[in-house]
Image: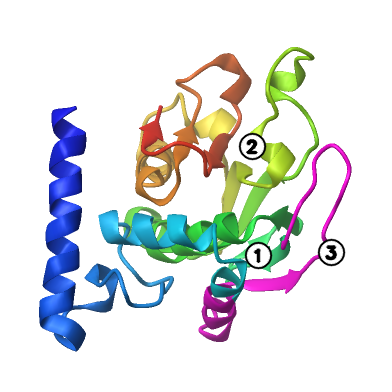
Amino acid sequence: MRYWTGTIVIFIIAILCALWLGDRIPQAYNPFAPLAVSDAPNLITRYKLRRLDGNPQACLDALDRAQSSGAIQFTRAENMGGKCPLENPVRVRGFGDVALSSSYLASCRLALSSAMYVSQVAKPLASEKLGSQLTRIDHLGSYACRNIYSKPDARLSEHATAEALDIAGFRLKDGRQLTVLKQWPQSGDEAQFIHALFSESCPYFGNSIGPDYNAAHANHFHLGMRWFGFCR
């Protein structure tokens, strides 16, 4: 309770400062400025991302700006009906010079958060910790019309709304292929890289679930948009 009270107070102060300082406040800390993929993952950025849920066109505009800057490649996808409907989905095809094992369907907000994570975390960490360029991300998919763990009595998974991506591995320019399954339990630079990729994903997504959560996630990171700050 004390945490949330402090968070709300900080947020109100940020809004008042933005109103007072106007254009002098940095964009990443201005709640009235459009979201950019270069914005730091602070409280204001989280607010901007949540606000886009109610404004699909503003979200797509933010994605268009991100594509123009080279941070993401995507195309707009058709709406889908049925048990697991999708409105305004996009198909993510890559993140600048970082390829994907395959394209994937995503909600607009998942695509934006993913682009921020790759450009601000994954790419810099590869160069910093392993001295090589990140060239590809291997994933297990995003959209799947199913319940959590495919249990018949469970609620719909985040994957049913294209609001989660399961990442299994990373490939580097020097030829190394790293996987969550292999590197997570090890030690050394490559294991530290994988652990850092997971821990630093947390501010960019509503939830980050990895191998320490349960056996079902032993081989991938589940990066989803539900909740706020769940990281385990």
Precedes in sequence: disc 1 or disc 2 = 1
Precedes in sequence: disc 2 or disc 3 = 3
Residue plotted at (53% across, 41% down) = 223
In the rendered image, residue 224, in percent from the top left (x then y), is placed at 54, 41
On the rendered image, what quadrant is the N terminus found in?
top left
Classify residue 99 by image quadrant. Answer: bottom right
In the rendered image, residue 227, in percent from the top left (x then y), is placed at 45, 36
Report whether 86 appears left or right of 204: right
Q: Which mark is residue 78?
A: 3
Colour mapping = rainbow
Precedes in sequence: disc 1 or disc 3 = 3
**What type is the residue that disc 1 sits on?**
Ala
Front in this rendered view, residue 16 or 165: 16
Decide: is 101 above or below 28: above
- Residue identifier under label 1: 99
Q: What element does badge 3 sit on? A: loop
Report whether 123 appears left or right of 223: left
Q: What element does badge 2 sit on? A: helix
Q: Nearer the viewer, mark 1 or mark 2?
A: 2
Classify residue 18 by image quadrant. Answer: bottom left
Disc 2 and disc 3 in contact, CB within 8 angstroms: no
- Residue identifier under label 2: 158
In the rendered image, residue 215, in percent from the top left (x then y), is placed at 58, 15
The residue range painted magenta reads: 61-88
How much space separates mark 1 and mark 2, taking CA atoms? 24 Å
Front in this rendered view, residue 218 or 88: 88
Residue plotted at (69% across, 71% down) = 74
Q: Residues within 10 Å of mark 3 (few under 14, many from 20)?
A: few
How much space separates mark 1 and mark 3, taking CA atoms? 23 Å
